[in-house]
Amino acid sequence: MELSEKIKEIGMDVGFDLVGIAKLDQSKYKEQVKNWVKDNKHGEMHWYAKNLDRRVNPKKNLYGKAISAITVGLSYRPIEISEELRNDSSRGLIARYAQYDDYHDVMFVMMEEFTDLIKKEINQIWNYHIYIDTGPVLEREVAEVAGIGFIGKNTILINPDMGSYFFIGEIICDLDLFQTSDVRNSGHRMSGIAKVGTCGLCTRCIQNCPTAALIKPYQLDARRCVSYLTIENKKDIPIDFRPMLKNWIYGCDICQQVCPWNKRISAGKLSKLKHRNDLVAPKLLGLLDLTEDGFKKMFVNSPVLRIKWLGLMRNVLVATGNWGNQEALPAVKRYIKHNNEIIREHANWALKQIKNKN
């Protein structure tokens, strides 16, 4: 059995839903990415601009010895919730991926197991690095080259069978492996390669983005994105954007919810991902009562921990202002004199919104 085929088989046995291999080369999006950073469309994500040369030239990883990328996908097929619950403005919405245990932790353990098994298979010294949203790599482009999906107009990786609700990770290595996406254009056969797909004429993601962050097909202004505003942004949420956030308190799924590729998707294995029903649409009043210790207990092992109590409470206050119910007044007033300026400002805004709506 050809080594690339064997590696793919090992990855599937470990529990991944998708496995592909890409030969590393200079990014075809090199100039677009550099201009995106130059125009500050990455906002406060300063980490993105670091090692930009390596990001668009992935062969420079591993001290210039990187040759191939083994790319994996792990489905988090979402638990469907009713329209009534989703549109209940007294509840906060959390992006579907964050309703599971932190995928970084789950996937890293799986990828370590994967690399251990590859080591046994090849019986030779090899150098590699595991990346899960953490390294200077254009993950979606590498995954596209590896054949496990295509980049949609919403800038998200889409697999024709599994939609876009899956996590991706890479093992950047110095093994000279056969590129799986080459199968479609050669006589070599390899099982399990993703079907070719496109967005066609569809622009539903662009039309439905609440903040017009998708400025045109395949281009995102992160500074306008609900996910950026509620997660990556550590400062005040700009006042003009607050009403547009509605009741999103961590991330956003709208550009995926409206995508036709996500209407009929195959069930993933989900074998090592634990779903949290209590994080589907928690009540805002309950969240407003959270202490910092209570926050840590409620979101234990959750990606939500990364924005800390401060970030979540800022977002919850915006959602509460958008809800506008007088029932929330006592809870909001408790934050008017909070020792943190960001909390005070968002509490005052929420208070004003509630009074204006009543």
Image (cartoon, rainbow, N blue to C red):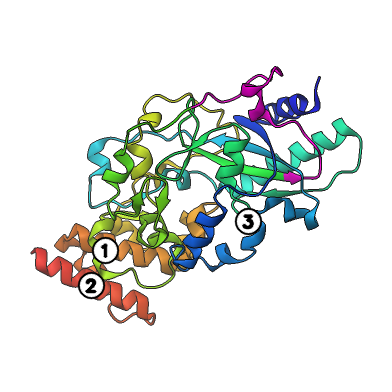
**Residue located beneath label 1 in the image:** 242
Nearer the camera: disc 3 or disc 1: 3
Q: Residue furthest left?
A: 358
Give, as a three-letter code, the residue at label 1.
Arg
| Quadrant of the rendered image containing residue 222 | bottom left
CB under 8 Å between discs 3 and 2: no
What x and y, as percent, mark residue 305? 50, 59
Nearer the camera: disc 3 or disc 2: 3
Give, as a three-letter code, the residue at label 3.
Arg
What x and y, as percent, mark residue 30? 57, 54
Q: Is residue 316 above or below residue 252?
A: below
**Residue located beneath label 3 in the image:** 55
What x and y, as percent, mark residue 321? 22, 64
Task: Point out the tag, 3 or 2, that comes first from the N-terminus.
Answer: 3
- Residue found at x 26% / y 44%: 207
Closer-to-camera residue (43/323):
43
Residue 176 part of the magenta segment? yes
Q: Is residue 41 above or below residue 209?
A: below
Q: Find the distance from the CA under tag 3 to the CA under tag 2.
A: 40 Å
> Please, what secondary structure does the residue beneath circle 3 have?
helix
Q: Is residue 251 left or right of 102 when viewed as pictured? A: left
Q: Is residue 109 left or right of 81 when viewed as pictured? A: right
**Overall secondary structure of the magenta section:** loop
